[in-house]
Image: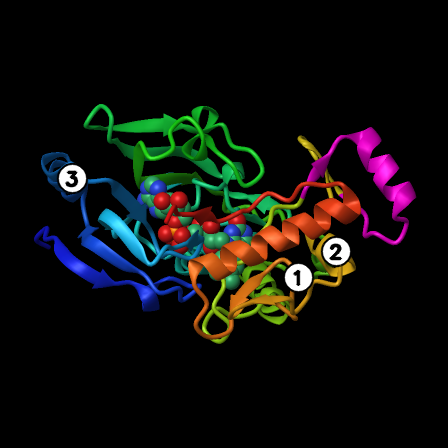
Amino acid sequence: MKFSVEDNVNLSMSNTLRLPARAEYYCEAYSTEHVAEALTFVERQGLPLLVLGDASNVVLPPVLKGLTLRVRMEGIEQHGDVIKVGAGVNWHNLVMLLCEDEWSGLENLSGIPGSVGAAPIQNIGAYGVQIEDCIVSVSVFDRKDGCACVISREDCRFGYRDSIFKGEYRDRMVVTNVSLHLSKQFTPVTSYRDLQAANVQTPLEMARLVKSIRSRKLPDPANAPNVGSFFKNPILDESAYVDFRSAHPTAPDGVRTDEGVKIHAAWLIERCGLKSMRVGDAMVSEQHALVIVNTGAATQSDVDELATRVREAVSDRFNLSLTIEPTVLPL
Ligand SMILES: Cc1cc2nc3c(=O)[nH]c(=O)nc-3n(C[C@H](O)[C@H](O)[C@H](O)COP(=O)(O)OP(=O)(O)OC[C@H]3O[C@@H](n4cnc5c(N)ncnc54)[C@H](O)[C@@H]3O)c2cc1C
């Protein structure tokens, strides 16, 4: 595949929120060499670089300035019980492929849209599992030093929907491969409420179950364009959680994590009566209060304004601050 740069590329149909967006310049990287060529291009022209996977967790402005690079590296290699995967591989397809081969570890993460390369960026998680549980290392191209290197799991500084790639290494590393440690021994993770009664014998059965639960609960981006959860669940320390529960006894139980007690942002939003609230064509989903959907011709500013109103309402009523989960790219 030869590296090439196009100009004025319409990305409106290739982001899951279906926001109108055009890239000033656009390229796809099928290898580390392509990433290096993209960097040379932006350096020569003094342009900014935006790295995208499948654009399922970004809120795009109408014009993407500079060069938009879509990561497309393919390839799945097995080295014992470590699987090294190209950043451009589709996440859900990878999970199903590995589960069919009886590898266990990723089954609870089936049905999450997006690419493998983006998965460590926000430490994707669902149904009691986060990708950090399986990551050995992340291979990257370092834009600052102009070379390829490998970052160990410890150095990724994973947290709840967070990693070093959203902090210190923001806009610096292009993920090229992810190495995952899996097992042929199936130990089902059924801590999550919906899975407690699960009667599954294999990773594949669990992956199918999770996918079917997700399809029932979450709006499908194909019919209701969205980026999944728009807000993170707030995390409270134990004493703040006790106060919260005594003030709001009907709130669902929080989930205890290493970082504190996670409370349900969807419940907070619902209690504020915000389901179906709209700004332009951006709307808080009727199906799931954590999701903002594009009902037609929403723009980034509609989505932005709606998110601000949700955050203000939750702050006024509960004195809690909601954090936005997807990457909102500047206008
Ligand atoms: C219906 C729906 C359900 C979802 N459910 C979940 C869920 O259960 N759990 C969850 O955690 N997430 C969920 N998400 C969010 C999303 O699927 C994940 O965050 C996913 O990992 C994003 O992948 P992507 O390739 O689309 O990334 P993009 O949206 O393209 O990019 C996301 C961010 O990562 C950066 N990035 C992408 N690829 C690279 C790379 N190779 N190198 C460096 N930076 C990169 C981008 O610059 C951007 O900041 C959901 C989204 C949708 C639409």
Under circle 3, the secondary element is: helix
Under circle 2, the secondary element is: helix
At horizontal 33% and vertical 59% (from top left) the residue drawn is 62
Q: Where is residue 121 in the image (x, y as percent from the top left)?
A: 43, 40
**CB of residue at label 1: within 8 Å of ligand 1?**
no
Q: Where is residue 45 in the image (x, y as percent from the top left)?
A: 11, 39
Q: Which of marks 3 and 1 is nearer the N terminus?
A: 3
Under circle 1, the secondary element is: loop
Q: What residue type is labelled 1?
A: Ala
Task: Work out whether 245 lies above or below 101.
Answer: above
Q: Nearer the viewer, residue 203 or 298?
A: 298
Task: Work out whether 308 lies above or below 141.
Answer: below
Circle 2 residues within 10 Å: few <14, some 14–19, many ≥20: some
Q: How far apart are marks 1 and 2 (CA)?
A: 8 Å
Would you say 161 lies left or right of 76 here? right
Would you say 108 lies left or right of 70 here? right
Examine the image and state in which quarter residue 261 appears. top right
**Residue under circle 3?**
42
**Residue under circle 2?**
267
Q: Position of residue 206 (x, y in %)?
A: 59, 59
Q: Earlier in the sequence, mark 1 or mark 2?
A: 2
Q: Distance between the residues labelled 2 and 3?
A: 44 Å
The stretch of residues the image draws in magenta is: 234-254
Task: Work out whether 257 lies above or below 299.
Answer: above
Circle 3 residues within 10 Å: few <14, some 14–19, many ≥20: some
Q: Which amino acid does label 3 sit on?
A: Val
Q: Where is residue 53 in the image (x, y as percent from the top left)?
A: 33, 52
At horizontal 59% and vertical 51% (from top left) the residue drawn is 308
Q: Earlier in the sequence, mark 2 or mark 3?
A: 3
At horizontal 59% and vertical 61% (from top left) the residue drawn is 210
**Residue under circle 1?**
289
